[in-house]
Structures are given as C-alpha cells and as structure tokens.
Image: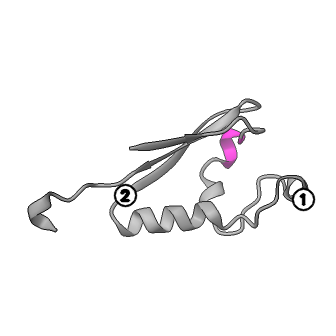
Amino acid sequence: EIAFSDTGVGIPEKYRTKVFEPFYQVDPSTTRRFGGTGIGLALVKAHNEAQNGRVWVDDNEGEGSTFYIKLPLAKEKDL
C-alpha cells in the first residue's frame, strides 16, 4: 500500500468517488489556478483495477487529501 498526501483545498465527501471519473473537476473554477485536466486519477484507477488493485481517497476537507494505492504482489515463482 502506498499513500500520497497533499495540503490542498480538500475534496468534499460527496465528490470523493467522482474524482476518479475521467475529466471530472470538483470545482471547475479551480482548474486555472491549480491546472490539470481531470484525467490523472481516472488513469491511476484504471491501471490499478487492471492489475486487481485498488485506489481510494481519505480527506480532511479544507486541509488536504490522502490518496492510497494498493496492488497485489506476485510471488517470485509466479513471475
């Protein structure tokens, strides 16, 4: 399991599953200020799910977010 944290504006709870949808912006007015197209998290989710992994977010709204990635590991003999 890997965790990435930031100290940004946070994500309101009702949008936490939507941020993994392609091109979704919680608040489009912040796009110019923070940049991005909204595709990054969708790509991370698709890549992880293709490998039987999982990605999710935990958030303290107004204080930042922590994103988690969990991927299954193959045993050496399975490689």
Residue 5, which numbered label?
none
Instruction: Determine the residue located farthest toward the left in the rendered image.
Output: 77
Count of numbered marks: 2
Q: Residue at x 76, y 59 (%)?
A: 25
Mark 1 lies on a secondary structure that is: helix
Of residue 47 and residue 21, the one placed in the foreground of this image is 47
Q: Amino acid at mark 1?
A: Arg
Q: Amino acid at mark 2?
A: Gly
How far across and how far down the image is residue 15, in percent? 68, 48
How far across and how far down the image is residue 23, in percent? 71, 68
Please name the residue that numbered disc 1 is placed on.
32
The answer to whether residue 58 is left or right of residue 61 is left
How far across and how far down the image is residue 56, in percent? 51, 47
Q: Are marks 1 and 2 in contact (CB under 8 Å)?
A: no
Q: Earlier in the sequence, mark 1 or mark 2?
A: 1
Q: Residue at x 41, y 54 (%)?
A: 54
Looking at the rendered image, the disc whose residue lies closer to the viewer, 1 or 2, is 1
Per the rendered image, the range of residues in magenta is: 11-15
Say which quadrant the C terminus sits in: bottom left
Q: Residue at x 78, y 38 (%)?
A: 9
Q: Does the magenta segment cover residue 36? A: no
Residue 53, which numbered label?
2
Q: Residue at x 15, y 57 (%)?
A: 75
User: On screen, 19 above or below 23?
Assistant: above
User: On screen, 15 above or below 42?
Assistant: above
Q: CA distance from mark 1 to mark 2?
A: 32 Å
How far across and how far down the image is residue 70, in percent? 38, 50
Say which quadrant the N terminus sits in: top left
Query: 10 Å neighbourhood of mark 1: few (<14), some, or many (≥20)?
Result: few
The answer to whether residue 9 is left or right of residue 2 is right
